[in-house]
Amino acid sequence: MSTDIKALKEAHTEHAVHDLIRQRFSARGFSDRPLSSETMNTLFEAAAWAPSSMNEQPWRYRYALRGTPAFEELWNCLAIGNQPWAKGAAALVVCLGRTNLQRNGQPNHYWLHDVGLANANLLIQAASMDIYGHLMGGFDHDKAKATLGLSELAEEVACFIALGHLGDAEQLVEPFKTREHTARVRRALSETVTAL
Ligand SMILES: Cc1cc2nc3c(=O)[nH]c(=O)nc-3n(C[C@H](O)[C@H](O)[C@H](O)COP(=O)(O)O)c2cc1C
């Protein structure tokens, strides 16, 4: 079943790109297979080797594995449009960023950019291990900060990520089942790129 979803979700590119880039997609249908803390550390290691402005490495991660009280707490922070499918994830990750430079306390204007780079590394590493991630901006910001006990100035919540191996998409409720069965699209490259 998940093989069909993988084929359906594969990117049809105008130019040849790496297989992992074609294969990664934002999954909603996860299997019961757990993720170990060792596997999670591999994903975070990949994230940690992303480039960042002045090597500030503003990313910070907190995560919880399915079946733990912490997983429930993180899941409770998600928007209702994400809760139904994200409940089946093997892990929920909160992506945080330090908004100030550690070297001098001045604002780091690139913190969110660099957290995004780290997350891209994490997703591609995950894809190489047949693990699928789904980023979520739909969450209750205040609830997330309160749940995590974040200090007001040092760290900001960027997004959540649901992670897991692919499962049976038929078990998803609508509209998530249809979304899982919908091919991915991108606008034409010519609308994105201008050679000068
Ligand atoms: C910062 C960010 C926030 C997102 N928030 C959500 C979300 O709250 N719920 C959701 O279902 N998908 C969310 N997505 C996933 C996007 O909808 C998805 O990446 C996009 O449609 C492209 O699909 P693909 O990742 O499968 O290529 C988010 C993605 C990013 C990068």
Image (cartoon, helix red, strand yellow):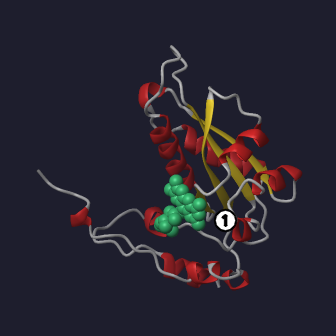
Q: Residue 131 location, x and y as percent?
A: 63, 63
Q: Residue 136 location, x and y as percent?
A: 60, 57
Q: Is residue 128 visible?
A: no
- Quadrant for residue 113, please give it: top left
Indicate yes or no: mark 1 CB to ligand 1 under 8 Å: yes
60 relative to 76, above or below: above
Left or right placement of residue 130 versus residue 149 in this view: left
Q: Nearer the viewer, residue 35 or 90?
A: 90
Picture residue at 47% right of the left edge, 80% below the top: 183
Q: Is residue 178 visible?
A: yes
Left or right placement of residue 71 versus residue 62 in this view: right
**Number of marks in the rendered image:** 1
Q: Nearer the viewer, residue 147 or 15?
A: 147
Q: Which residue is mark 1?
A: 82
Left or right placement of residue 70 versus residue 5 in this view: right
Picture residue at 47% right of the left edge, 39% below the top: 114
Determine whether the residue tagged by mark 1 lies in a helix, strand or loop: loop
Picture residue at 44% right of the left edge, 34% below the top: 110
Q: Nearer the viewer, residue 76 or 66?
A: 76
Q: Nearer the viewer, residue 176 or 181?
A: 176
Q: Residue 125 location, x and y as percent?
A: 56, 54
Quarter the N terminus occupies = bottom right
**Three-letter amino acid code at disc 1?**
Asn
Picture residue at 36% right of the left edge, 70% below the top: 186
137 relative to 177, above or below: above
